[in-house]
């Protein structure tokens, strides 16, 4: 791969890992993780260390590896590339044999064994792209990826030893710990079984600050957030604290003895140093000359009818709008339905629990007044310009397909050229948007979070709504903020005042603090800071001189 020009951080990674069997590349989106991993694989092949490469990636991204990335970056290496799941896997001597597969194959009953047997039969390097897909070690696909490529010795359910059969393994992600330290155990267990010297439960005990509460007569351990800690700490008696949160007497005594909130995680500096022994962290601003990012938060108010339904559901778990009963049967569905109301609609009570997180557009009822849509029309006109003579482009992302569908129909009625990409419906293509045939792209967060590079033509993005996933948020932002972007990227968030929108927003900020703490080299104390998220200013917060929300 001598003809390929590597950035300094990519060359440093190649030198660091060319003789290593453990390759954790924690690069921000847009920093060239794919090229770096392929460069390392090519180097190992050319020196006879490997003859096979198994790439495991999210659905659709695995095809991009096979049809775009590998042909582009491995022109100097003789390869065979396979990615269609219905083909029998083959091997050609003298070439670097590459198989690209969807990680979901490891959730199936039998198909995953084809990849295991193929890899274990050759000198194989495995690349696990977007490796946080295995952060839950109890999931079936995580268990298979963690141990099927190894020689494992067990005593009952206890693993005594686990030795990789493959030559090398690489994990690629820019977000190794978006929900906290627990995310990283599986990643390093895949790379190096027993890396932390602790099993999953021992790892949680070391890095989590657990407290005991009573639930239906049973004592369970949980991680208490700061608000709950203060309620217990400031309570006048154990009886009051137990009524508020169900804490046990031992937990009450521990919290009362603490002078400040110490959780939910601990020993994070030790964990970070252990990760840094082999991991390479790269932030995009530190390796590439990038433009700035500007974050603009717009606080909006619900219509009177929205507010009535919202607060009734929040208080009583049931409300009604027009002829549609709105009911929440669990805490999770309360959060989802409240977010839907804040976005301007209610979903049918007939929708199964499995569909409530993304109800089809034909099973929802919209409020008559839609403040977010009203604000959107103002912002779109300002960014895109005249619908008759548009001069700009914008990407609008949202949590629910129903939102995207309503936004699409509204903008079409206004005369705009709109591309729609959701889990329920597609109009136009991302390629057509890239070619300038559309001025507006409306998409689900999950649909557009990976595999699409849109930095060449667009630098405005509107978050009509968010999910609680920081990983999704970072990945979506990176569709326009990556190598090749020349202009300041502008991100606009619509946040309904005094609603779940504010809690989602706050949760993302807190997760970002922890993710930065684990990723950044300086051991700054970011875990225990208390920061007022919503001041009286209309649009912006400033951190270290840069306008941002996180």
Image (cartoon, grey):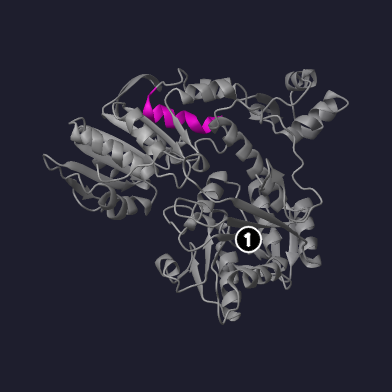
Q: Quadrant of the N terminus?
A: top left
Label 1 neighbourhood size at 10 Å, few (<14), some (14-19), many (20+)? many
Q: Position of residue 246 (x, y in %)?
A: 75, 30
State the residue in front, 3 or 204.
Answer: 3
Magenta segment: 181-193
Could you say which quadrant of the image residue 172 lies in? top left
> For the residue labelled by badge 1, is the local secondary structure a helix, a strand or a loop?
loop
Q: Is residue 463 magenta?
A: no
Find the residue positioned furthest to the left. 93
Q: Is residue 386 above or below residue 309?
A: below
Classify residue 81 as left or right of residue 318: left
What residue is rendered at 60% in x and 65% in y? 403
Tell me where residue 336 appears, x and y as whole percent.
64, 53
Tell how many labels: 1
State which quadrant residue 98 falls in.
top left
Query: In this rendering, does residue 242 appear at all?
Result: no
Query: Where's residue 110, x and y in %?
Result: 29, 43
x, y (%) of residue 171? 39, 36
Q: Is residue 59 above or below residue 196?
A: below
Most foreground residue, 218 or 127: 127
Q: Is residue 185 magenta?
A: yes
Dominant secondary structure, magenta? helix
**Which residue is label 1 attached to?**
464
Residue at horizontal 65 percent and vertical 53 percent from the top: 295
Question: Is residue 499 toward the left or the right of residue 71 in the image?
Answer: right
In the image as oriented, which residue stretches furthest toward the right?
Answer: 236
Quadrant for the C terminus in the image: top right
Q: Nearer the viewer, residue 501 or 231?
A: 501
| Quarter of the view holding residue 530 | top right
Identify which residue is drawn at 58% across, 24% down: 268
């Amino acid at each position: 791969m001598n003809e390929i020009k590597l950035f300094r951080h990519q060359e440093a990674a190649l030198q660091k890992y060319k003789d290593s069997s453990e390759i954790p590349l924690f690069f921000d989106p847009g920093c060239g993780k794919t090229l770096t991993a392929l460069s390392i694989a090519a180097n190992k092949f050319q020196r006879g260390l490997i003859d096979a490469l198994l790439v495991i990636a999210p659905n659709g991204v695995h095809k991009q590896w096979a049809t775009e990335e590998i042909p582009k970056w491995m022109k100097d290496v003789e390869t065979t590339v396979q990615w269609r799941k219905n083909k029998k896997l083959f091997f050609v001597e003298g070439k670097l044999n590459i198989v690209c597969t969807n990680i979901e194959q490891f959730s199936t009953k039998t198909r995953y064994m084809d990849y295991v047997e193929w890899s274990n039969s050759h000198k194989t390097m495995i690349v696990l792209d977007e490796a946080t897909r295995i952060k839950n070690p109890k999931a079936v696909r995580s268990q298979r990826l963690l141990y099927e490529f190894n020689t494992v010795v067990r005593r009952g359910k206890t693993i005594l030893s686990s030795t990789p059969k493959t030559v090398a393994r690489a994990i690629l992600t820019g977000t190794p710990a978006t929900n906290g330290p627990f995310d990283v155990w599986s990643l390093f267990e895949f790379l190096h079984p027993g890396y932390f010297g602790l099993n999953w439960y021992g790892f949680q005990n070391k890095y989590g600050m657990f407290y005991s509460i009573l639930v239906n007569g049973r004592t369970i351990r949980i991680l208490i957030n700061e608000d709950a800690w203060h309620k217990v700490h400031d309570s006048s008696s154990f009886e009051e604290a137990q009524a508020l949160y169900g804490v046990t007497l031992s937990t009450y005594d521990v919290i009362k003895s603490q002078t400040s909130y110490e959780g939910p995680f601990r020993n994070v500096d030790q964990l970070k140093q252990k990760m840094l022994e082999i991991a390479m962290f790269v932030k995009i601003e530190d390796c590439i000359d990038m433009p700035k990012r500007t974050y603009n938060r717009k606080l909006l108010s619900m219509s009177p009818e929205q507010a009535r339904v919202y607060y009734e559901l929040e208080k009583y778990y049931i409300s009604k709008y027009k002829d549609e009963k709105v009911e929440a049967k669990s805490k999770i569905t309360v959060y989802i339905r409240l977010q839907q109301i804040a976005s301007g609609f209610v979903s049918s009570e007939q929708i199964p629990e499995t569909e409530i997180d993304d109800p089809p557009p034909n099973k929802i009822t919209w409020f008559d007044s839609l403040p977010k849509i009203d604000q959107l029309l103002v912002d779109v006109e300002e960014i895109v310009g005249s619908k008759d003579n548009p001069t700009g482009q914008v990407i609008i992302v949202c949590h629910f397909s129903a939102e995207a569908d309503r936004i699409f129909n509204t903008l079409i009625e206004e005369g705009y050229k709109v591309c729609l990409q959701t889990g329920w419906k597609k109009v136009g293509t991302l390629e057509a948007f890239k070619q300038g045939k559309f001025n507006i792209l409306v998409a689900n967060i999950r649909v557009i979070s990976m595999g699409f590079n849109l930095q060449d033509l667009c630098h405005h993005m509107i978050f009509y709504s968010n999910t609680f996933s920081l990983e999704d948020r970072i990945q979506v932002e990176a569709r326009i903020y990556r190598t090749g972007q020349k202009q300041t990227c502008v991100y606009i968030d619509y946040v309904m005042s005094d609603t779940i929108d504010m809690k989602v927003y706050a949760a993302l900020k807190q997760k970002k603090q922890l993710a930065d703490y684990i990723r950044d080299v300086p051991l700054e104390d970011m875990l225990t800071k208390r920061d007022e998220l919503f001041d009286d200013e209309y649009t912006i917060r400033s951190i270290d001189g840069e306008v941002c929300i996180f």
